Image: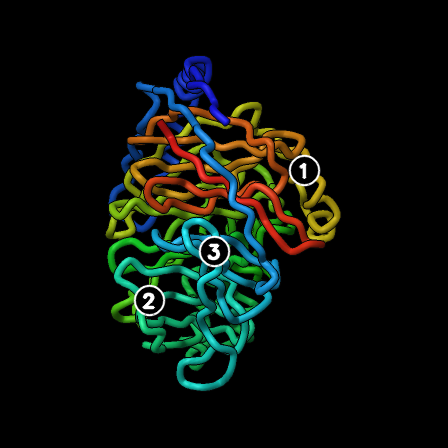
Amino acid sequence: MRYKPINCSHLFKAVVLFLSLSSALLLYSCKNRNSETSSPIELRGINSLGAANFVITDTLTISTERTSMSGRWITDGKSLIFADKGKVPVSLYSSVGKFEKQIFVQGRGPDEILSPATALLPLSGGGYAYFSPGDGRFYLFDSLLNNLSSFNVFKVTDKDVDWDDLLRNPDPENLTMYEHVLFNNDITELDDYILFPITTEHQRYNGFMKNQRAKEFYRDSYTLMAINKNDPAELRIFGHFPTIYNRRMIPNFMNRTVASDGSNLFVSYEADFLIYAYDKDLQLSFAFGIAGKDVKDNYPEVTTFEKHEETNKAHHAKYGHYLQMVYGDGYLIRKYNRPDDISAIQIYKDYNLLCDIEMPYKRFEIIGYIEPFFYAQAYVDFEYEFCKIIRFKIE
């Protein structure tokens, strides 16, 4: 299947008009609060838009009978990997979909894991980072699957916490306020850091109840964590919600996704079309991105947790939002949903949008890049335990 180049000039005109009216306010509010400067961040990628061909080369049918079928496909650049959320063993497949082996063993031994992962990251130097919410531990394994270290990320300061005081006086600078965001296996690495989204669901400090504390939550709470893989005791929290979350309560669209090109960390929020780039020092450096087709800033306000639970699924089906990013071969691919639950992708190169394409698949997810192809999940059959994965190129 071949998709012709898409001319994005109409998107460019709309974005330039919008930015000319509001970019000063938007960019000032998105400054890096962790830096010593209050100057606006640089906006890139709106002055030269290109085009690209999205070419599907073939489809792989893969048996998933060894898996729980709950999880997400990822790649280490050589193999397809099913990051299983229902079982500890992780299944590896060849680049053409042939089962190869399973790694990781469930248990309490020195190189074993007690419960399945919500985040699994193949490391660039070999080995894996594995986050297991069942026992609350973060594991680092070498390429031979020896456990290099394991610790409870969010409990490292327990002995110093006055829990009654923290309940009465929530402190966004306190690490024990946070937990890993259990969404989309979002975890990546940049230089010495392993990075992933975090949130706090403190009883009196969260994004669900409309009050003064909610305003403080969206303004002051941190959204990202970094762990130094060479010194896991070094933990850093950084990043804040963009200004759209300060304007009204939209807790149904609080999730975020991360990716890295080796020089920058890219962060995209569900309700914000901009992609934010952090440098290797985890300082907010610049932003880029263009709104997905038909995606508008019209999310309805939700002001109680009960209303969130009642409307979350329906709002995600109705309103456009940004879901997932993968970087490979010089391209950043962002998956998003258009209104009425239509899957689509944007393809960026050098921070410029090349094309914006609707995907004719209901369970579409970008997997990653194994030279010379990108991979994406197109279909899952839970009854007969198989999935279809497409391989495609960008030309």
**Frontmost residue, 82 versus 95:** 95
Image: 108 above or below 79? below
Which residue carries the number 3 mark? 98
Label 2 neighbourhood size at 10 Å, few (<14), some (14-19), many (20+)?
some
Q: CA distance from mark 3 to mark 2?
A: 21 Å
Which residue carries the number 2 mark? 127
Mark 1 / mark 2, whichever is N-terminal:
2
| Quarter-of-image position of residue 277 | top left
The residue tagged with tag 2: helix, strand or loop? Answer: loop
- The residue type indicated by label 1 comes to Ala
Image: 215 above or below 154? above
- The residue type indicated by label 2 comes to Gly
Q: CA distance from mark 1 to mark 2?
A: 37 Å
- The residue type indicated by label 3 comes to Lys
Image: 115 above or below 284? below
Mark 1 / mark 3, whichever is N-terminal:
3
The residue tagged with tag 3: helix, strand or loop? Answer: loop
**Frontmost residue, 283 versus 159:** 283
Q: Are marks 1 and 2 in contact (CB under 8 Å)?
A: no
Which residue carries the number 1 mark? 317
**What percent of the width, then of the height, locates residue 322?**
52, 38
* Residue farthest to the bottom, as pictured: 109
- Position of the C terminus, as image quadrant, is top left
Question: In the image, is 278 to the left or to the right of 379?
Answer: left
Q: Are marks 1 and 3 in contact (CB under 8 Å)?
A: no
- The residue under the point 72% across, 44% down is 311
The residue tagged with tag 1: helix, strand or loop? Answer: helix
**What percent of the width, then of the height, locates residue 37?**
25, 43
In this rendering, which labeled residue sits more in front, label 3 or label 2? 3
